[in-house]
Amino acid sequence: MLFYLSGSIEYSPDYGKGWRRELTPFLTSLGHRVYDPALDEKKNLTPEELKNFRRWKTEDVSLFQATIRKIIDYDLNIIEQKCDAVIVLWDEYATKGAGTHAEVTAAYR
């Protein structure tokens, strides 16, 4: 099975890397594969988007939002087309963004 690890990235203090790093070895020891969106920062972004989108969060909200929507679309396609299951960490950081909400909805559908 391929598991998608859903949860906050943008609003987490460690960009959501810690819990995913801890869970991945367990899942792989059971013979599963893992897609960790926090490790795949390039996704389908242009070099300019990859370099600047976090800065745009405070300097150009419309560019930031457009880039985040592009990231969400990319991740939703992975959930819908490639993953067998989604594991979600729903914490105080997940409630601040949009990606986790969309991922949970896509998994439900």
Image (cartoon, helix red, strand yellow):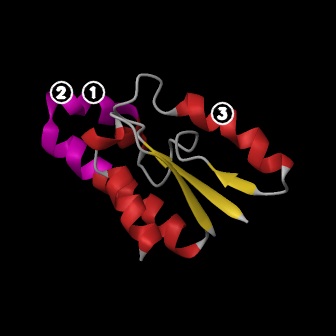
- Report which residue position mark 3 lands on: 21
Q: Quadrant of the C terminus?
A: bottom left
Q: Position of residue 18 (x, y in %)?
A: 58, 28
Q: Is residue 55 on the magenta stretch?
A: yes
Q: Nearer the viewer, residue 41 or 80?
A: 80
Around disc 3, counting alpha carbons within 10 Å, would you say few (fewer than 14), some (14 to 19), or many (20 or more)? Answer: few
The answer to the question of whether label 3 and label 1 lie on touching residues, with beta carbons closer than 8 A, is no
Task: Identify the magenta region.
Answer: 51-68
Horizontal relation, residue 27 to residue 50: left or right? right
The kind of residue tagged 3 is: Arg
- Report which residue position mark 2 lands on: 58
The answer to the question of whether label 3 and label 2 lie on touching residues, with beta carbons closer than 8 A, is no
Q: Position of residue 25 (x, y in %)?
A: 77, 39
The numbered mark, 3 or 1, whose residue comes first in the sequence reads 3
Q: CA distance from mark 1 to mark 2?
A: 6 Å
The kind of residue tagged 2 is: Thr
